[in-house]
C-alpha cells in the first residue's frame, strides 16, 4: 500500500510498497482510509522534537474510512461500516477507560515501560506517534489497523455528512472542546486563545458553546486571524504587529484584570516575539538542550486574571524551564491539560454537527491526494499558500 513514512527530521516520503496491515488481535479492525489529516502534533515529529521516532514509521492520527476486515472478537464493527478513528487507543475496560479518561488508558501502550521512565506512568498508546507511545502505524496510509477497534471508532450512519464534516471528530474538534471544558468557562467569561491553528479555531468555537461572553484570539498569521474573526467571531491580536506585548494589549482590553480563562493552543513550538525567555528557548532547542519552547505557556500564566484558569491543549514533550510557578501559585490559578479523551466527546459533538450547530469543514484549506503529503507537510509547517488544515485522500 501507499503510506506517508517518517525518515527523519523534515523528511517525510510517500512510499508505495509498504506492507498492508493485518489483523493482529481479535478486537482489531482494518480500515480503508478515505480521508486523513495532518495535525499540528505531526509537526513535532516532522521537526524532530519527539523522541523515539524510527525511520520507516507510518505517520498520521486523524483518519477515517470504511471497515474492510474485522477481527473475530470484535462485536461492534462490521465490514462496510463508515468510521472515524480517534487518535487515542483505548482498551475500554481499565481503571481510566472506565472513567472515560481515554487518553490515559493503562493497557494500550505496548511500550509503556519507555513512557514510564520519561513520565512516571504511561499514558495511552497513540496512532502514528512514536515508539514511546506504542509504536503503532498511523493513518496517513491506504489502510490502517485499528487496535481495540471495538472501543474507539465512531460509526457515521448519516451519509449526507461529508468526510470533511466528520473527520475532525478523530482529534481536533474534541481537542478544542475539551480545552474549553478544561478552561472551566462560566457564562459571560472572557476567554483568550493563543494560537489560531486548527486546534485554536475549535477552541474558539467551543468557548462560545460553553457560554463565553468574549473570545480573544492571538496569532500572527493573517489568514488564521481572519478565520478566527470571521468564523469564530473573536476579537483578535496580531502578536507580530502590536506595539508593546500581548500582556499589555490584554490588560488594556480587560480593564487591567486579565482574561478569566486562557487557552494555550500553541504548545512546544511557540514563536517568540524577541522576549528574553523566547530567545533562550530557541537557543536551547537548537543545541538539543531542551525540546520545548514554552513562551506561550508562560504568557498565559502571566496574563490570566487572579483565580482564573489556564487550559493547555498545546502539546509539551519534555522539561520546561523558566516556568512562572510563583505567579501561578500566588495568583491562585488552576492549570488543566492533557491529550484529549476523544471518544468521550464523540456523540455530543456528532450531534452538534448533525444539528447544523457547527460545520467543522470550515478549517480545511487543502484537500489533496496522499502523494502530495510530503510537500504539504512543509506547506503546513511554513504556513505557505494560506494553509490552515490539510486533508489527504489516499
Ligand atoms: P498549528 O501549528 O497549525 O498552530 C499553532 C499556531 O500557533 C500557529 O498558527 C502559530 O502561528 C501560532 N503561534 C505560534 N507562536 C505563537 C505565539 N507566541 N502566540 C500566539 N500564537 C502563536 O497546530 P494545531 O494543529 O492548531 O495544534 C496546536 C497545538 O495543539 C499543537 O501543539 C498540537 O500538538 C496540539 N494538539 C494537542 C492535542 C491534544 O490532545 N491535547 C490534539 C491535537 C493537537
Ligand atoms: Zn492531531
Image: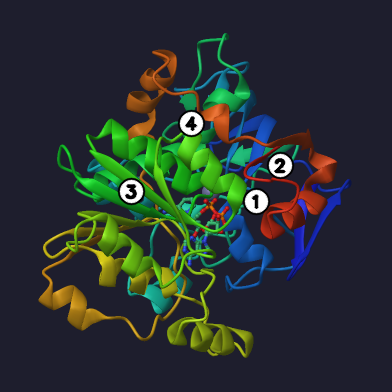
Please identify the quadrant where the C terminus is shown.
Answer: top right
SS type, badge 3 = helix
Can you see residue 6?
A: yes
Q: How many labels does the image show?
A: 4
Give the crowd class for mark 1: few <14, some 14-19, many >=20 residues within 10 Å: many
- Which badge, 4 or 1, is on the more N-terminal residue? 1
Q: Closer to the camera: disc 3 or disc 4?
A: 3
Q: Does the residue labelled 3 lie within 8 Å of ligand 1?
A: yes
Indicate which disc residue 179 carries: 3
Residue occupying the point 50% across, 37% down? 170
Give the crowd class for mark 4: few <14, some 14-19, many >=20 residues within 10 Å: many
- Residue occupied by mark 2: 21
Q: Position of residue 192 (x, y in %)?
A: 32, 53
Q: Please say if the residues under marks 2 and 1 sit with CB atoms less than 8 Å apart.
A: yes
Q: How far separated are the C-alphas under marks 4 and 2?
A: 17 Å
- Residue occupied by mark 4: 153
Q: Closer to the camera: disc 2 or disc 1?
A: 1
SS type, badge 2 = loop
Amino acid at each position: 500500500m501507499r503510506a506517508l513514512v517518517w525518515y527523519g527530521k523534515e523528511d517525510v516520503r510517500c512510499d508505495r510498497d509498504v506492507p498492508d496491515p493485518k489483523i493482529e488481535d481479535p478486537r482489531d479492525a482494518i480500515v480503508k482510509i478515505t480521508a486523513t489529516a495532518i495535525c499540528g502534533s505531526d509537526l513535532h515529529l516532522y521537526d524532530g522534537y519527539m523522541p523515539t521516532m524510527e525511520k520507516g514509521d507510518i505517520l498520521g492520527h486523524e483518519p477515517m474510512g470504511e471497515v474492510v476486515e474485522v477481527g473475530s472478537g470484535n462485536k461492534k464493527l462490521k465490514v462496510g461500516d463508515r468510521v472515524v478513528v480517534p487518535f487515542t487507543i483505548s482498551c475500554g475496560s481499565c481503571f481510566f477507560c472506565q472513567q472515560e479518561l481515554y487518553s490515559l488508558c493503562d493497557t494500550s501502550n505496548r511500550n509503556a515501560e519507555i513512557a514510564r521512565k520519561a513520565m512516571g506512568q504511561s499514558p495511552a498508546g497513540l496512532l502514528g506517534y512514536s515508539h514511546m507511545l506504542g509504536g503503532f502505524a498511523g493513518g496517513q496510509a491506504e489502510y490502517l489497523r485499528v487496535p481495540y477497534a471495538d472501543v474507539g471508532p465512531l460509526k457515521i450512519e448519516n451519509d449526507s455528512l461529508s468526510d470533511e464534516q466528520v473527520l475532525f471528530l478523530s482529534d481536533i474538534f474534541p481537542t478544542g472542546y475539551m480545552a474549553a471544558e478544561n478552561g472551566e468557562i462560566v457564562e459571560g467569561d472572557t476567554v483568550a486563545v493563543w494560537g489560531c491553528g486548527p486546534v485554536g479555531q475549535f477552541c474558539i468555537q467551543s468557548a462560545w458553546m460553553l457560554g463565553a461572553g468574549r473570545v480573544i484570539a492571538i496569532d500572527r498569521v493573517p489568514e488564521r486571524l481572519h478565520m478566527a474573526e470571521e468564523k469564530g467571531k473573536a476579537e483578535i491580536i496580531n502578536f507580530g504587529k502590536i506595539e508593546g506585548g500581548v500582556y499589555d494589549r490584554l490588560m488594556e482590553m480587560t480593564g487591567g484584570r486579565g482574561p478569566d480563562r486562557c487557552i494555550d493552543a500553541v504548545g512546544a513550538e511557540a514563536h517568540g516575539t524577541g522576549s528574553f525567555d523566547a530567545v533562550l528557548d530557541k537557543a536551547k532547542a537548537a543545541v538539543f538542550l531542551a525540546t520545548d519552547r514554552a513562551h506561550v505557556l508562560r504568557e498565559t500564566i502571566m496574563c490570566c486574571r487572579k483565580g482564573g484558569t489556564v487550559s493547555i491543549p498545546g502539546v509539551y514533550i519534555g522539561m520546561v524551564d523558566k516556568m512562572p510557578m510563583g505567579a501561578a501559585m500566588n495568583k491562585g490559578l488552576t492549570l488543566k491539560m492533557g491529550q484529549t479523551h476523544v471518544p468521550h466527546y464523540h456523540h455530543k459533538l456528532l450531534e452538534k454537527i448533525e444539528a447544523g450547530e457547527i460545520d467543522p469543514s470550515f478549517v480545511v484549506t487543502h484537500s489533496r491526494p496522499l502523494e502530495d503529503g510530503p510537500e504539504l507537510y512543509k506547506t503546513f509547517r511554513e504556513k505557505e499558500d494560506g494553509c490552515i488544515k490539510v486533508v489527504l485522500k489516499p
